[in-house]
Amino acid sequence: MTTERESIAAFDEKRLAAIVELYIRTGIQVHSPGYMGRQFSGTVPMAGVIDFVGSVVNQPSSYYEAGQLPITAERIMAEELNRFIGWDPGRFAMVTTSGGSLANLTALLAARNRAYPDIWACGEHGGRGLPAIAVSEEVHYSVTRAAGVLGIGEKRIVRLPVDPRGRIAVNRVPAVLAAAERRGLEVFCLVASAGTTALGAFDPIGELAGIAAEGGIWLHVDGAHGASLLVSDVLRHRLRGIEKADSLTWDAHKLMFVPAPCTMLFYRDARDAPQAFGRGAASYVLDEEPDAHCALDSGDKNLECTKRPMIMPLWALWAVYGRALFAEKIEQLCQTAHEAHRVLLDEPDFEVLHEPEANILCFRYRPEGVAAERVHRLQLRIRKQVRLAGRFFISKVDVQGTAALRVVFMNHQISAEHFRMLLAEIRSTGQRLLRGDLPA
Ligand SMILES: Cc1ncc(COP(=O)(O)O)c(C=O)c1O
């Protein structure tokens, strides 16, 4: 389809149709009940319509003068969602970022700059020890990568051990932090996960907040996956203590069913938000005679200069359908994970790895007699064959060093019956692999 032309070609309906058809047919089919593998969701169709409008009007949302409605909608959604976080409405702030990874990086920058006020200007931390961060062994790689970007060496990432359910073992944290201090490290930020990527486990935020406050440490909660549970009255308790955190990453393109990316980074104290990037905005965007609307600009608080008006699909869904749309769907997905877990418990040839806290379920196909050293490769190969067969899409993740099959329920049309069909496919694929009937 990519042919070289001398001049602008006439509009070719057939070519356009072929491109659209190819786009729809290839890649992961996120709207299918067979899609159970990743954390981005099939979108609510209306969100797609608003996104389409956004692509045509093309109003970036960093500055009010360009994107008046998106910037206003950001403020409205911030206030709506902060009701569930519980921060002082007059003091908190929210900025959108292009993805949870960038939100985590931005939060770590703000935390570092608050702990070391001279570092942005002089590059010198001037602290007691070497700046370090403390993270769960299960933390998302975007956080450890952000540490690298900040110049915090791998060896200065303090790893907090987890319990068998994948949550930070809070009783062991003080000792690990004390050991880090003895090594000459100064932990300025502790990162908790509200929904780990592997198991969907929720760290005990309230207890960690107590430890962080005692040490004068910033508590960042990576809720890229699970912060959305806050909008549900029955699931909110998973993030108990969130009101004590300093910042929160919240991906709406995961459990709020809007097009990616749509991420919100919340700060408990609005004064921390502009600290992330110092004061270096350029004269061509900075208004030297600011009016009231300039206070809504977010350009000074973001790494991005031009930023998609990503809030619009979320705000439109919220405005048209209300909170219940999100709450009910999230509750249903978590309930499906719960039912799937029960189904799995009755299948002796499957190894159940945890009781799901959200909509993620990990397990292994492990019939009796399979040697321990074959289990890892078997899961990898099952996952690959299932993907190639095309009826289901699941993912894999290492759990305690051994590959596991990972199912993420993102589609409310998935029932326990679909899950049973998936298990049947995994079983038959596994058996064929063990018999050597399938290529290695
Ligand atoms: C816990 C967690 N944090 C951060 C991220 C990164 O978010 P994004 O993919 O929006 O950059 C993910 C993505 O899966 C995640 O699961």
Image (cartoon, rainbow, N blue to C red):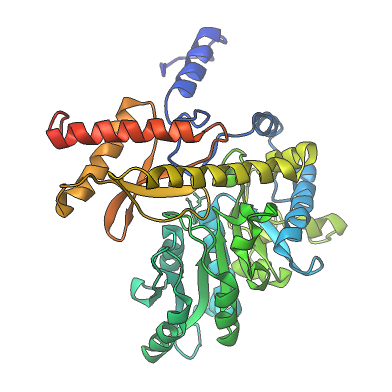
Q: Position of residue 150 (x, y in %)?
A: 46, 69
Compared with residue 67, is residue 246 higher up or lower down, i.e. above or below?
below
Q: In which quarter of the image is residue 211?
A: bottom right
Q: Would residue 251 be visible to someone looking at this image? A: yes
**x and y percent of residue 282 in the render?**
66, 59
Between 344 and 75, the one lying in front of the other is: 344
Q: In this view, does 325 lie to the left or right of 115?
A: right
Q: Along the horizontal axis of the image, is 359 left or right of 81?
A: left
Q: In this view, does 62 lie above or below 276?
A: above
Residue at the spot 25% in from the left edge and 46% down from the top edge: 366
User: Can you give x and y, in whole percent of width and height, for residue 64 in the image?
Assistant: 78, 49
Q: Which residue lies furthest to the right in this view?
A: 292
Looking at this rendering, what residue extends furthest in the left direction? 436
The C terminus - image quarter? top left
* Residue at position x 14%, y 28% in the image: 437
Q: Report the residue at 69% width, 30% height from top.
A: 46
The answer to whether residue 264 is left or right of residue 167 is: right
Residue 102: x and y in percent read 53, 56
Please state which of residues 300 and 190 is positioned toward the viewer in this rendering. 190
- Can residue 113 be seen here? no
Number of numbered tags placed on the structure image: 0
Residue at image coords 46%, 42%: 340
Q: Relative to the observer, which residue lies in front, 90 or 344?
A: 344
